[in-house]
Amino acid sequence: MAAFAQSRPEMSERVSFAIVALVLGASAIAKGVYPEAIVTALRFSIRTYSASAGAWLAIVTGGIVAWEIVLACQLLRRPAPSRWVTRATCATLVMFAAFLEWLWSQPLAPPCGCSGLPTGLSRQSEAGLGILRNVGLVLLLAYACRRDGDEKTRAPAATSERGAEQRAFTLVELLIVIVVIGVLMSMMLPGLARARTSAREARTFSDLRQALVVLSQYAGGEREMFPFIGTPGRPDGPLHIRGHTLRTSANGGFWGQASLWASVAVPEYAADLPRKDASRYWNGARPSSESESPPDWLIATPLLLSFSTMAAKEFWDNRWEFADIDRFRGTSWVHLGFPSRKGLLWDSRVGGYTGGPMEIDCRVFTAWGDGSAGFLRASQMDPSLIAKDPYTGFESAIMNTFMGVSGIDRR
């Protein structure tokens, strides 16, 4: 009876280790059989959708699967797994829980893929279950390792050195602290993520409104015209900025103008606009005798001017003919038929392209012709309001509007 009673704790520990090992092993096998879910979640986390990134993410997913299998096998060792195995397993589960918590706090995140299989659950439900599963496994490991801590607590302190060792943290106490910290972080991270998102959006709206002021100030001295720095009738022609000529449009067609429009604005009004590196435009257009660094008068901004302002409405009627190339010229504010429903500026730093391969109802942050700023969701975009662009091949609300500035971007 005494031997049986002594074996009961050992049996419960083995069962606990076996449960954790089976869950990890089953999850690893499921990820190996159906890796698309976890690859999609990882792809969303790094915000890149290129083919080369997909190959690396496949390697990372294979590493995760192999690591989980190694941990599962080590947890099944007898008489008990080593201390580094339990610590590594706890650290892995805590990191997975933190990643799931981050995905849970992202409004556009895909399903987490934590189970490795398509479950049919909602994104937040699947992430929440994954967090609970990982926290439960950490607690189960803490239970399985409790005897090690209990034996240290009961060991007699024959010397002062052993007494000091007895007063140290046990493994169980350390794991409990890690779990508590993880729970507190899971409670705080969504609030912090929402606060960062709100701050970023507020800054975006402020920048867009400031850019509208710059546009209106420019129009006040240019007969109500929008900035036009291209060559009329030549979408692939040189750009003309403040008395200087860039021999070729570094980004082709409309893109160079969309980024460099602030270069012709009154400097004191454009000084506070967000900027991006103008080297790509200057290095592709500079004369060979000039320096490689762009001059001070060349201003590139991520607040892109709508393509619709760079050609007359006949250019955007989806009945394009070669004769319509003459319609490539500056337009005026007076052509703005529906100011509250026509977007003039798009902040390319946030949101995403419409119809992007991994964008889920992405938001296009824009400044409207009536002076307001907001965002337009992909689900709210009417394809019939988007014009085809024969030069850049880019089709998007705000940028390519059917009937140009005379048209609308939202119903």
Image (tube, rainbow, N blue to C red):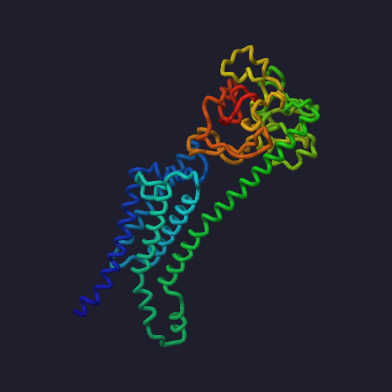
Quarter where residue 24 is shown: bottom left
- Looking at the image, residue 140 sits to the left or right of residue 100; the answer is left
Quarter where residue 162 is shown: bottom left
Q: In which quadrant of the rendered image does the N terminus lie?
A: bottom left
At 46% across and 39% down in the image, what residue appears?
A: 54
Residue 293, percent from left and from top: 74, 36
At 28% across and 66% down in the image, what residue appears?
A: 14
Report whether residue 341 is seen: yes
Q: Which one is nearer the viewer's eye here, 205 or 56?
A: 205
At 52% across and 42% down in the image, what residue appears?
A: 47
Residue 382, percent from left and from top: 52, 29
- Looking at the image, residue 40 sits to the left or right of residue 143; the answer is right
Rendered view: 71 above or below 368: below
Residue 76, percent from left and from top: 30, 61
Q: In which quadrant of the rendered image does the C terminus lie?
A: top right
Residue 291, percent from left and from top: 76, 34
